[in-house]
Amino acid sequence: MSSLILGKEYSRSDVHQIFSPHTKFTPQAGTWGLHGIVAVPDREADYVFFVTYGQQQADHLFDEGINSEGVLSWQSQPRQTLDDEKIRQFIQHDETTSQIHLFLRTDKRSDYRYYGRLGYLNHDSTREKPVYFQWQLLDWDDLSDKPSIDLLAQKPESNGNTESNPKGLTHQPVPTPKNRKKGVDKETFRSVKVANYAERDERNRQLGEAGELLVVEHEKKRLLSEGRADLAEQVVHVAKVEGDGAGYDVLSFDSSGQKKYIEVKTTRGDASTDFYMSSNEIRFAAFAGEHYYLYRLYSFNKDTRSAEFFIHTGDLAGGKFKLQPISYRVSLSGLMD
């Protein structure tokens, strides 16, 4: 039996054998042999997308492509509307609980290349038949070679920082949450193709450390400006000294000398980008209470070493944040009767 390997080429028959080996495959017919959207059997909301880039169906030319940040512009079948059950399911797609796998080719006579899993980014709420989506290729950074230039249909959007921006951190108020499932109008959809960096940035240790270093510098400068050079000398990059087990990244102080336990979360996306925290970090936030500070850095620019940020103080449960458990540690609870 074939196995699923990122970047490998597969025929429709190969993909069928991976996801539905106990059903019959008929070339050029049926769900697996013909359809572009295939539901994986016995899965609640898992799908396979077969995409042929540059294809035309009747008088409709599909406008699809991948930009250099791994954002896929994709259209549903021409007959589908915003009220279609599958379309509503795609809009509500959560990559932590279900999977959509992308198989893409640029020639209808060729096999499909596996581009990995997709995560919902956006959709056009004003157009249907077809419905227009933007997806993040979650495994983009792990692809050994990216698509050739003719597949880069859009230029990547700026993350909000330019070379003219000053280095360091820019403090912002806590943003108002966005309803990312609501969709956008046609003009916004076409002009904004911003990647969702949440999962990719979570695995980027260099990015995390760069954000922590910015906060260390920021805290030292703040204490110096407040006339507390003695405390500035005592700021510690705990994550560098001890590793990740302490439950916070930076030990600092307020102007009165009270300790500040600072957790730093850094992403390249905007302020609404999700971020990840361990159970230990969540637990420590509750334990430290008013002495706990979350420094949420976003729109990070590695060239200028700059970012915007907001601060949350105290426990993370309830209020501004929605905590979603995505993994569990399971052990036997006792002897069975």
Image: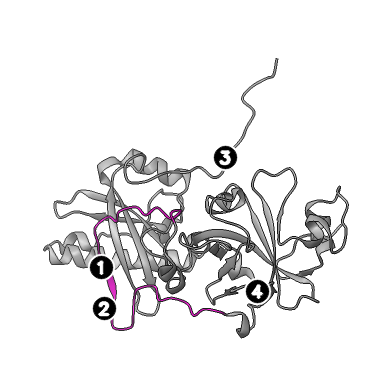
Q: Position of residue 130 (x, y in %)?
A: 58, 63
Mark 2 and mark 4 lie on one chain; the one further toward the N terminus is 4
Give amino acid for label 4: Asp
Mark 2 and mark 3 lie on one chain; the one further toward the N terminus is 2
Q: Are marks 2 and 4 in contact (CB under 8 Å)?
A: no
Give amino acid for label 2: Pro
**Residue drawn at (64%, 56%) of the image:** 100
Say if residue 259 shows up in the picture: yes
Give amino acid for label 3: Tyr
Q: Residue furthest front?
A: 59
Residues 161 and 15: in front is 15
Mark 4 and mark 3 lie on one chain; the one further toward the N terminus is 4
Task: Name the residue carrying label 4.
Answer: 59
Task: Name the residue carrying label 1.
Answer: 170
Q: Is residue 166 magenta?
A: yes
- Of tags 4 and 3, which is closer to the observer? 4
Residue 173, picture quadrant: bottom left
117 on left or right of 125: right
Q: CA distance from mark 2 to mark 4?
A: 50 Å
Residues 292 and 195: in front is 195
Q: CA distance from mark 4 to mark 3?
A: 49 Å
Mark 1 and mark 3 lie on one chain; the one further toward the N terminus is 1
Q: Are marks 2 and 1 in contact (CB under 8 Å)?
A: yes
Q: Position of residue 255 (x, y in %)?
A: 15, 55
Residue 29, picture quadrant: bottom right
Residues 77 and 332: in front is 77
